[in-house]
Amino acid sequence: MRRFFRKDAIDKINQIFSFTFIFRTYQSGDLILEETEAFRLCYYTYPHLRTLFKLAGLEPVAEYGSFAKTPLDNTAEQMIFLLRKSS
């Protein structure tokens, strides 16, 4: 089985990324089955998250770029926040 994805659309205003996964099953080098599944993902930016935390009465205690606690910088693939109630 081989998996691919096709970018269908990016809505920069609403921050939605639409794409389709394509799963192709081969037997002896011949394509015997192709299945697709559409996905829509929304995403948040760092400033949006900080604003949402503040509006919810929360403040960051720590922030990381992964669950392994790597730095949150431009190479990070995740944004992990530890939060507490604002004082």
Image (cartoon, helix red, strand yellow):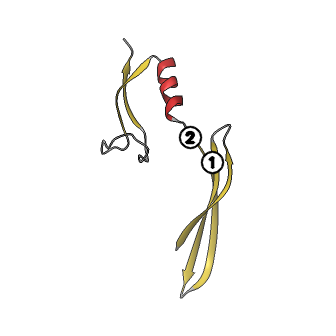
Question: Residue 29: percent from the left, percent from the top?
Answer: 55, 86
Q: Left or right: where does residue 61 sit relative to residue 20?
A: left
**Which label's residue is closer to the chain start, 2 or 1?**
1
Question: Residue 39: percent from the left, percent from the top?
Answer: 62, 52
Which residue is situated farthest in the bottom direction here?
Answer: 28
Q: Quadrant of residue 65?
A: top left
Which residue is situated farthest in the front direction here?
Answer: 74
* Disc 2, SS: loop
Q: Quadrant of residue 61?
A: top left
Q: Amino acid at mark 1?
A: Phe
Q: Left or right: where does residue 52 sit relative to residue 79?
A: right
Question: Residue 46: percent from the left, percent from the top?
Answer: 49, 34
Disc 1: which residue: 17
Quadrant where the image shows the C terminus: top left
Of the pair 29 and 49, the residue shown nearer to us: 49
Q: Is residue 58 above or below residue 29?
A: above
Which residue is situated farthest in the top direction here?
Answer: 87
Q: Which residue is pictured at 63% across the width and 48% down the height?
A: 17
Q: Which residue is pictured at 48% across the width and 26% down the height?
A: 50
Q: Amino acid at mark 2?
A: Tyr
Question: Residue 84: percent from the left, percent from the top?
Answer: 36, 21
* Label 1 CA crowd tier, 10 Å (few <14, some 14–19, many 20+): some
Disc 2: which residue: 43
Residue contact at pointers 2 and 1, CB within 8 angstroms: yes
